[in-house]
Structures are given as structure tokens and as C-alpha cells.
Amino acid sequence: MRLSELQRKDIVNINDGRIIGRVIDADISEKDGSLICLVIEKSKYLRNIFSTESEVTIKFDQIKKLGSDVILIEI
């Protein structure tokens, strides 16, 4: 699967059903080319006026399912 395909999917937390955001980047291991984490741009609903971070990283082991339209994660 290509990064561009992942960028079209919403990231959904399976614990509460909230949309976290969308993939904007990925961190790949230089040693073996494996995926370390995904960088997610937070959904506008999760950002607030007190939050300065607009990105969150999701480790590979937090990804539970890659669907056709969404990526399910557990955080």
C-alpha cells in the first residue's frame, strides 16, 4: 500500500469512535524499511484554542485494522 492511499483514509479511534484526523506523513525505518509510525493531522474537532499541537503520531502497534475507507487505531 502506498502512502498516498493511506492519506485518503480517516483515522478512527476504536475506543470512542472519534475521527482523529488524516495521515500526512510516515516514519520509515532506514534499516529494514518497516513502518515505525504515522503522523496524523488532528481533526478540527479535536483541536482547541489551548492546543498548540496540530499533529499526533501513531505507532505501528496502535494500528488495529486497515479498512478500505478508514484506519482503526487504539489510543
Image (cartoon, rainbow, N blue to C red):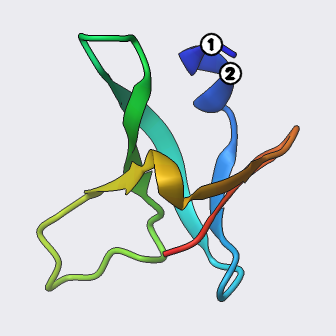
Residue 68 versus residue 36: which sits nearer the camera?
36
Residue 49 vs 22, above or below: the answer is below
Q: Which residue is mark 1?
A: 2
Rounded to the nearest angstrom, the CA distance separating label 2 from label 1 is 5 Å
Give the side of residue 54 with respect to residue 71, left or right. left
From the top left corner, tell me how far across and down residue 52 is, in percent: 11, 69
Give the side of residue 8 with respect to residue 27, left or right. right
Task: Judge the density around disc 1: few (<14), some (14-19), many (≥20) Cα neighbours within 10 Å.
Answer: few
Secondary-structure class at tag 2 = helix
The quadrant the N terminus occupies is top right
Residue 24 vs 63, above or below: the answer is above
Give the side of residue 52 with respect to residue 61, left or right. left
Which residue is at 41% across, 48% downward?
40
Q: Looking at the picture, which amino acid does disc 1 mark?
A: Arg
Q: Which residue is mark 2?
A: 5
From the top left corner, tell me how far across and down residue 58 is, in percent: 40, 54
